[in-house]
Each structure stands twice: as structure tokens, then as C-alpha cells.
Amino acid sequence: MPPPTMPPLNDIVTAIAARLLTLDPGPLAELRRMEPGGAATPVFWRLAAEQDLPRATTDAWMRIVRIMAILSDKGAPGTRKPLHDWKRPLGAALADGGDTEWTPPPGDDPSPVLSEARLTRFLAVPPEDRGEALERMARALARRRQPGHGLDCADIAKLLLFGGDPDPVQKLARDFYNRLDGAKRRAEKEKEGTA
């Protein structure tokens, strides 16, 4: 009999996000404080067992779960909205703060949540150092993200699990600039309409 195969990444991330919704604030805070590469928390190990996460990628999954916990809405279970939304790329959320209605005031250049300089520095980070840099970006996003607005957590997982693959990093940059340039074009059209 062949060994069991791991479910698709989006299924795993969806299940983890759903599980995070059920956690009380204390265990969710434990996941936010968990040190990747350390002993982790019982909550993480339950998630790892539920999802049958590969042992070889445990440290990366610790970081992924920690980032997802950081980005999760605060509050009691039942009051939080799902974090994972596969239709909202991480790069777009880093530009607009997760606000799907984000448009700059007419005549103003849009100011992304994550500066272009900071994105540029992240794009140059070697894959082995990407975890800490991605966590810092997630903390910045968490401070500005509108509660209830999700993002594609599979983008986070791909950045940390597939370090040698340029596709996740290129997708992040493409989604960021697509969202930022779209906002700039709308602002220019509105400015022309008022002139």
C-alpha cells in the first residue's frame, strides 16, 4: 500500500485557519508567542497531528501557524471572521491593509501599508532568513488590517515551505504592485474627473 499523501496546501491552510477560529484568546496568544524551532505549544502539536504535517517541515509550519495567529482577529471564538481567503492575495493585502474597498483620496498617491522599500528589502532576503522578515511584515499588517478582511494564507505557507522556488516571491511582488498600481490609476481618474 502506498504511503498516504499530504492534502493540497490550500486544504491544510483552510483547516488550520478554521481551527484558529475556535481557539480561546489564551491559546491563540500562545501561538503568537511560540518560538519557531523551539518546543512549541500543545495547541500547535494538536494542529500538526490533525493535519499530519510532515516532520521535516515542522519549523516552517511553526512559523506559518504563528504568522496566521498574529494576523487572526482578536476576540472570543464566534466573534472572529475567517482569516484565510484564497481570493485575496497576501501581496494585495500588504498594499491595501486587507481593505477590499481601499482607494486613496482623490489627488493623493496611495500609500501602501507596507512601503515599497520594505517590500524591496524582503524580496532580496535569502530564503533561509525569510521567516523572520515575513513575520515582521505580518505584524505591521496586523496593526493596520481591517478586522474580518481575510487574505490568502497559502501565500504565507508557500513563501516559507518552498524557499528555493522563485514563484511565491514573484507572486507576492506582482500582487502587491497590481493592487498599488490599480489604486494609483483610480486616483488619477478621479483627479481628472474633478479637474
Image (cartoon, helix red, strand yellow):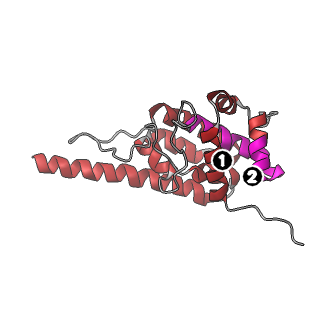
In what element is the residue under mark 1? Answer: helix
Locate residue 28 relative to residue 87 in the image: left or right.
right
Q: Magenta region's main secondary structure?
A: helix
Who's the residue at 26% across and 51% down the image? 186
In the depicted view, which residue is nearer to us: 104 or 167? 104
In the depicted view, which residue is nearer to us: 117 or 165? 165
In the depicted view, which residue is nearer to us: 165 or 81? 81
Who's the residue at 49% across and 53% down the image? 89
The residue type indicated by label 2 comes to Gln
The magenta segment: 46-71
Determine if the magenta segment contains residue 69. yes
What residue is disc 2 on?
51
Who's the residue at 17% across and 46% down the image? 191
Q: Position of residue 102 (x, y in %)?
A: 34, 44
In the depicted view, which residue is nearer to us: 147 or 113? 147
Locate residue 132 relative to residue 86 in the image: left or right.
right
| Residue at the extreme front | 78
Between marks 1 and 2, how big is the CA–CA gap? 8 Å
Name the mark on residue 16: 1
Q: Position of residue 155 (x, y in %)?
A: 58, 52
Name the image quarter holding the N terminus: bottom right
